């Protein structure tokens, strides 16, 4: 770059000097020609005046000496005079045959104008000037005194040939002097420029090198310059300070982000591009976190996590499994698997709380034999809640690529963790407030919420509910005989019998004390009584252990009603089932009774219903 710039500058100067040389040579040549032309005009005027003087003095015969004397003047190579036809007719041809020698003489006589001609050969340069003499009676002398002619007529001409070779030679010598001077100046300029531009080129190359390294993502390089001149040092300091700030800022951002964001091990080497990527990921995670804050429950959060894993991160075959304490049994909360997959309680990742991958050991798990390449990652959300991500890939290469995505997945799980903990705690609190602690059945408080929802749905869709009111026979005797701890065992045994003998769509409540309520979804009369009998017989056969290790058995009384057959009010139907329950107790206990209006004894009581 330095040589190229120096050559451009020197070349420009050389071309300028060459042009100057050519112009000077041409100027010297033109100046020589101009001097010769002026000298020719002077000689022509001198010859004219001399001839006129000879004619007036009557010594015209002696003009030949005069003309030879002039022709020997310095620089004059040849001189001759030509008479016009009118003068020849009046005075004759004169000495030396003073007639037109060539076409130039004839043209000068005919046109009455000065003619010039440059004659060049390999060795000499000559200038010929042919000047006509024009007759006039107003000047001094008066031409009409001697010549029989008219005003303005050409009397003759004089041709003078000058040798201007010296002028050409002087032009060439001057041009060579200028050329030599130009070469010396160019060499000096080249040396000066080359020396002056060395620190400039040094800092330029250093800046180029540093910028190329920065383009490749390497920001540790700095500009160097050996020159101590203030301007160069200012440039060096400015660029290096900017690079120091840029590198420091990018490094600080990366270190700060690492505190709360997992970075991919194969992140981009360019800190600037990596920072841009991190900022985008932070923005996406922040938007995700803001969104799940307003989700109603864990299921919605799980769905959003699964949607991000599927559409943003690009996982194709995977499931999300929730597990934990407080009766949170392993269950699939998001299913994006290519085939139906079941949950195995012996899952190695769930059991060991460690990541399990198929490339660790052949058939390491034994349960994920549906794919040769699989990956299971457990995420501890809280002490009560755990999330398992199981991924299946078609090839080991795809599995390797999926592993590079784990830090990004970790970031989303970390962002969702507080919301999952909060919503899980909310669900636990809700369950604890609506669930009986002893039996783990819904309590009376939840019954109010359930009936409000169930009633509107039942009326809208024409749903039939069978209602069972259940009570343990002679329960007070159990408490009095064995104590309240054994009474609680009896109540728990009844709750187990209910869970084992009702359907998933049915709902059981601990209504109060030893009294239980069961709402049977879409259940007709015959099925209601069948389920009631099934519960009664199951409980009758359940042994209850006392404090002395002895066992005893208890029986049930069951009252049943049908909504909306018995009433269009669920609460009234519950009351009717309660009336049927008391009817069963009055009938000897350990039996099931279907409500009948006749069970309402008094007219006043009937009016209430």
Image: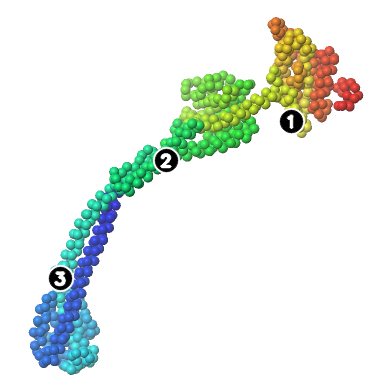
Q: Nearer the viewer, mark 1 or mark 3?
A: 1
Q: Residue at x 50, y 38 (%)?
A: 279
| Residue hosting label 2 | 246
| Residue hosting label 1 | 453
Q: Residue furthest front?
A: 230
| Relative vertical location of residue 544 with respect to residue 382 in this rendering, above or below | above
| Relative vertical location of residue 14 with respect to residue 419 in this rendering, above or below | below
Q: Secondary structure at mark 1?
A: helix
Query: What percent of the width, then of the height, locates residue 23?
Result: 24, 66
Residue 276 seen: yes
Report the Cα–Cα distance between label 1 and label 3: 127 Å
Q: Are marks 2 and 1 in contact (CB under 8 Å)?
A: no
Query: What percent of the width, then of the height, locates residue 216?
Result: 39, 40
**Where is the C terminus found, in terms of image quarters?**
top right
Q: Say which quarter of the image contains residue 327.
A: top right
In primary-sequence order, the first of circles 2 and 1 is 2
In primary-sequence order, the first of circles 1 and 3 is 3
| Residue hosting label 3 | 165
Q: Nearer the viewer, mark 2 or mark 1?
A: 2
Q: Secondary structure at mark 2?
A: helix
Q: Residues within 10 Å of mark 3 (few under 14, many from 20)?
A: some
Question: Is 421 or 553 nearer to us in this picture?
Answer: 421
Q: Residues within 10 Å of mark 1 (few under 14, many from 20)?
A: few
Q: Residue at x 47, y 34 (%)?
A: 256
Q: Say which quarter of the image contains residue 132.
A: bottom left
Residue 342 seen: no
Which label sits on residue 57? Answer: none
Report the Cα–Cα distance between label 2 and label 3: 74 Å
């Amino acid at each position: 770059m330095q040589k190229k710039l120096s050559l451009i500058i020197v070349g420009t100067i050389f071309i300028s000097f060459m042009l100057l040389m050519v112009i000077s040579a041409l100027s010297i040549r033109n100046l020589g020609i101009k001097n010769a032309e002026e000298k020719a005009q002077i000689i022509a005027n001198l010859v004219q005046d001399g001839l006129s003087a000879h004619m007036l003095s009557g010594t015209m015969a002696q003009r030949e000496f005069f003309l030879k004397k002039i022709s020997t003047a310095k620089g004059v190579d040849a001189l001759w005079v030509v008479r016009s036809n009118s003068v020849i007719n009046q005075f004759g041809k004169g000495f030396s045959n003073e007639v037109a020698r060539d076409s130039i003489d004839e043209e000068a006589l005919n046109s009455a104008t000065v003619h010039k001609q440059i004659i060049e050969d390999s060795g000499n340069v000559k200038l010929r000037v042919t000047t006509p003499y024009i007759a006039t009676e107003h000047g001094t002398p008066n031409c009409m005194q001697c010549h029989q002619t008219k005003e303005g007529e050409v009397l003759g001409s004089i041709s003078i040939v000058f040798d201007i070779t010296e002028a050409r030679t002087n032009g060439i010598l001057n041009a060579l002097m200028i050329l030599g001077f130009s070469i010396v100046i160019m060499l000096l300029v080249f040396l000066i420029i080359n020396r002056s531009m060395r620190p400039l080129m040094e800092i330029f190359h250093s800046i180029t090198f540093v910028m190329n390294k920065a383009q490749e993502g390497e920001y540790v390089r700095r500009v160097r310059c050996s020159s101590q001149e203030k301007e160069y040092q200012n440039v060096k300091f400015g660029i290096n300070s900017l690079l120091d700030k840029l590198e420091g800022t990018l490094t600080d951002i990366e270190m700060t982000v690492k505190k709360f964001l997992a970075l991919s091990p194969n992140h981009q080497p360019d800190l600037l591009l990596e920072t841009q990527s991190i900022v985008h990921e932070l923005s996406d995670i922040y938007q995700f976190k803001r969104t799940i804050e307003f989700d109603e429950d864990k299921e919605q959060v799980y769905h959003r996590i699964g949607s991000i894993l599927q559409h943003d991160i690009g996982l194709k075959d995977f499931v999300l499994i929730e597990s934990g304490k407080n009766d949170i049994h392993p269950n699939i909360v998001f299913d994006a698997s290519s085939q139906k997959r079941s949950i195995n309680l012996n899952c190695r990742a769930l059991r060991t709380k460690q990541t399990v991958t198929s490339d660790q050991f052949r058939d390491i798990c034994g349960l994920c034999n549906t794919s040769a390449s699989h990956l299971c990652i457990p995420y501890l959300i809280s002490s009560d809640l755990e999330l398992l991500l199981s991924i299946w890939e078609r090839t080991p290469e795809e599995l390797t690529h999926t592993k590079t995505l784990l830090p990004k997945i970790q970031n989303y799980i970390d962002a969702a963790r507080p919301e999952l903990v909060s919503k899980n705690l909310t669900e636990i609190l809700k369950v604890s407030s609506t669930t009986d602690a002893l039996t783990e059945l819904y309590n009376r408080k939840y019954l109010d919420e359930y009936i409000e929802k169930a009633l509107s749905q039942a009326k809208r869709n024409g749903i039939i509910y069978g209602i069972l009111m259940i009570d343990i026979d002679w329960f007070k005797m159990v408490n009095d005989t064995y104590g309240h701890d054994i009474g609680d065992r009896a109540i728990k045994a009844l709750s187990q019998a209910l869970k084992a003998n009702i359907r998933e769509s049915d709902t059981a409540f601990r209504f109060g004390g030893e009294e239980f309520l069961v709402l049977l979804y879409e259940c007709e009369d015959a099925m209601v009584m069948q389920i009631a009998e099934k519960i009664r017989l199951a409980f009758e056969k359940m042994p209850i252990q006392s404090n002395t290790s002895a066992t005893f058995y208890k029986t049930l009384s069951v009252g049943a009603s049908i909504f909306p057959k018995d009433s269009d009010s669920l609460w009234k139907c519950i009351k009717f089932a309660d009336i049927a329950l008391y009817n069963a107790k009055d009938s000897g206990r350990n039996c099931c009774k279907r409500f009948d209006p006749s069970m309402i004894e008094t007219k006043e009581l009937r009016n209430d219903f």
